[in-house]
Image (cartoon, grey):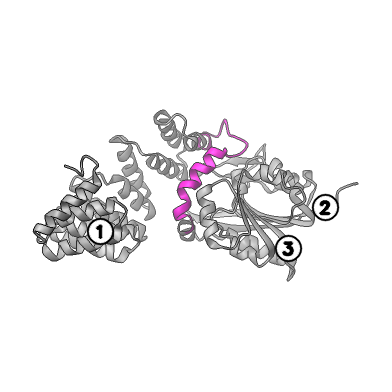
Amino acid sequence: MLLEAGDLDGAEQAYRQALAYDPGLAETKNNLALLLRRRGRPEAAEAIYREAIALAPENPLAYCNLGQVLFEMGRLDEATEMLGEAVRLNPEFAEAFHNLGHILSVRDRPQAAAEAYRRAVELGADAYLGLATALREQGLVDEAIAAYRHVIGIGGKPATAFYNLGMLLSAQGRDGEAAEVYRQWLEEEPGNPVARHMLAASQGDAVPSRASDDYVQAIFDGFAPRFDQRLAELDYRAPELVTELVRRLSGPAARRRVLDAGCGTGLCGPLLRERAERLTGVDLSGPMLDQAAARGCYDALVQAELTDYLASSPACYDLVASADTLVYFGDLRPVIAAAAQAMAPGGYLVATLEKDDGGLADGYRLRGHGRYSHTEKYLRRVIADCGLELVALESVVLRQEMAQPVIGMLFAAAWVKRDA
């Protein structure tokens, strides 16, 4: 009763008093451990759960709860073992199957995760969202689409279901269906910047000249904790491509002042560090910058919109490096013009874009995945218009997406002496 009333101190005192009278109360130990977990004391909760298991080794609930604590502590192997024991003891334990599916998904075992989620669904658990994600990660697109539609159909309508369903439909060329999904999402959340951006991407009209700040922050703030892992799964190569071109351009000499433009979690940071006497990173997402700071290779990290930051930093950088950031700009003129202003004499801009071979009137388009692609002709024109000289341009594979290579452009533009 005290716990339900929110009196955690009183509840803990009562549980401990009960156990002082009778240390063999396994259920009370389980309740005390649950309270300790809720209070942010996972190590203490683990110890009590293990005492409860020792008293009642056939109780699946204690194993399930211990598995969750171990998962929260990052001990995934042990967590999997505990949840496996819970479902062995009780093959009808829906919550344990659901939790097991989640841990297996985090461990990048989508097939095993899908099996656990399916069993949870059979037992009545609301596990369709996890199941849909596991199916998507296996490339079982039609099944994943059906599962995401089920999630949306039963209510609750989590944003991740709308987003992933729309992305899967777009990847299959079903842009009209994707647009309907995003419209429904906007009906649920009229101000959602991701839904608004993705609707424009799937419709192909009312396309913004660049992704809004709200969209970029919404995507990357939530993506930050698993960003590096996810990109590794996609064989993401942009940081290595950018820094290798920097090496070829500058040889053994270091560029004194280097800007990692759109640094994200800092994947370019360690590679650029050897080229920099001073390395600065700029990004819109605070959580991404927190990840970058943990790498310990930046002299400064700045949270700002890239074009504004570059425009406010005249002649400050000998190198502006940007891996997979300009794909969130359709019209490249403002950002490349600002980069030209920020470059000191002799400086370089080295960056990647996604390549579009279509005959586009504007030279760019917003794709169904939410990023922009650009034509080579458009890039050449913008670089010349901004007073820079294109010194390198290569066609490259940036990543794999839906088992297909994403073709990009890796380019370098050099500072040109301005007229007096």
> Which numbered mark, 3 or 1, is in the foreground of this view?
1
C-beta proximity under 8 Å, tags 3 and 2:
no
Is residue 196 at all visible to an observer of this figure?
yes
Q: Earlier in the sequence, mark 3 or mark 2?
A: 3
> Which numbered mark, 3 or 2, is in the foreground of this view?
3
Q: Which mark is residue 45?
A: 1
Q: Earlier in the sequence, mark 2 or mark 1?
A: 1
Quadrant placement of the N terminus: top left
Q: Secondary structure at mark 2?
A: loop
Q: Which mark is residue 198?
A: none
The residue labelled by disc 3 is 255
User: Mark 3 to mark 2: distance in Å?
Assistant: 17 Å
Residue situated furthest right in the rendering: 420
Segment colored magenta: 200-228
Q: Is residue 35 above or below residue 239?
A: above
Dominant SS of magenta comes to: helix
The residue labelled by disc 2 is 416
Is residue 399 at all visible to an observer of this figure?
no
User: Mark 2 to mark 1: distance in Å?
Assistant: 64 Å
Q: Where's residue 160, x and y in %?
A: 39, 42
Q: Where's residue 100, x and y in %?
A: 26, 57
Q: Where's residue 99, x and y in %?
A: 26, 54
Q: Residue 155 sits in which quadrant?
A: top left
47 in magenta? no
Q: Residue 47 sits in which quadrant?
A: bottom left
Q: Residues within 10 Å of mark 2 (few under 14, many from 20)?
A: some
Give amino acid for label 1. Ala
Residue situated furthest bottom in the rendering: 252
User: Mark 3 to mark 1: distance in Å?
Assistant: 52 Å
Give amino acid for label 2. Val
> Which of the pair 351/257 is nearer the observer?
257
Q: Secondary structure at mark 3?
A: strand
